[in-house]
Image (tube, rainbow, N blue to C red):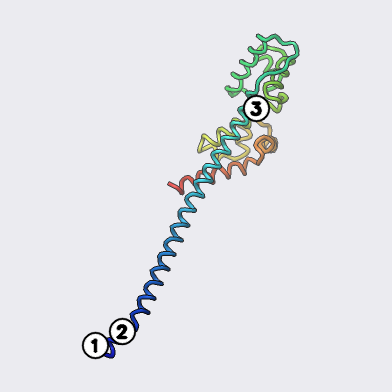
Amino acid sequence: MNLLQFEGAVENMPYIFHYTNINSILNTVIITMILGYFLYSFYQKKNINTNSNIKDNQIITVLSNSILSPLNNSIGISKVTKQDLIKKLIEFENSDIFLEKNISLAKLSSYLNTNTKYLSHIIKIHSDREFNNYINLLRIQYIVNKLNDDSKFINYKISVMADEAGFSSHSKFTQNFKLIIGESPSSYISKIKNKKTHLIDTI
């Protein structure tokens, strides 16, 4: 390298350093943006899963609370009879008898060894619902629990779920599910599937 070439190289060094600095800054910015995107996506998925779990728990809790609401009214039933009926009702709720399609107020009264008047009153105070709505609530709660706990059940057809829950038709099941849960069975199932997909993606 002669003197002129050396002087030219020295004159260009500031530009070379300037160009190198710009590249370094740009690379740093790009890497930071990429890391930021992945961190944002991770926490978004985490929040979605958390919110979904909260919602599922809230649904089941609301159903449980409505079924276990305290007795605070009377039509002249003795305290012992009230307590006995409530105990029997709780045992009934923990069984699968409410899934029977032919369940009725008269049949349940006979099963619990009481009369329809007393039983109807206790159910009304106990759950704040008439008999049919009370049974529908228990059935929908059963399905909600199955959907959240049984990974195979979530892939069943709506008609199969309706039949297992004791409903006479697909439409009645869907109608009651939407009335109690606030959305259709298919919509609720899609959210559970999405939640499970997000959980797999974060592993």
Residue 140 versus residue 95 in the image, above or below: below
The quadrant where residue 146 appears:
top right
The quadrant where residue 93 appears:
top right
The quadrant where residue 135 appears:
top right
| Residue type, label 1 | Met
Residue 121 versus residue 163 in the image, above or below: above
Q: Earlier in the sequence, mark 3 or mark 2?
A: 2
In the image, 155 versus 65, the foreground residue is 65
Q: For numbered disc 1, what is the local secondary structure? A: loop
Q: For numbered disc 2, what is the local secondary structure? A: helix
| Residue type, label 2 | Ala
Crowding near the residue tagged with mark 1, few <14, some 14–19, many ≥20 C-alpha atoms within 10 Å: few
Point out the image quarter for the N terminus: bottom left
User: Which residue, given by chain and number where applicable, does mark 1 sit on?
Assistant: 1
Residue 89 versus residue 61 in the image, above or below: above
Residue occupying the point 58% across, 22% down: 94
Distance from the alpha carbon under mark 1 to that under mark 2: 10 Å
User: Which residue, given by chain and number where applicable, does mark 2 sit on?
Assistant: 9
Q: Earlier in the sequence, mark 1 or mark 3?
A: 1
Distance from the alpha carbon under mark 3 to that under mark 2: 84 Å
Q: Earlier in the sequence, mark 1 or mark 2?
A: 1
Crowding near the residue tagged with mark 2, few <14, some 14–19, many ≥20 C-alpha atoms within 10 Å: few
User: Which residue, given by chain and number where applicable, does mark 3 sit on?
Assistant: 66
Q: Nearer the viewer, mark 1 or mark 3?
A: 1
Is residue 167 toward the left or the right of residue 21 in the image?
Answer: right
The reply to whether the C-beta atoms of the residues labelled 1 and 2 are less than 8 Å apart is yes
* Dot label at residue 161: none
Residue occupying the point 66% across, 31% down: 167
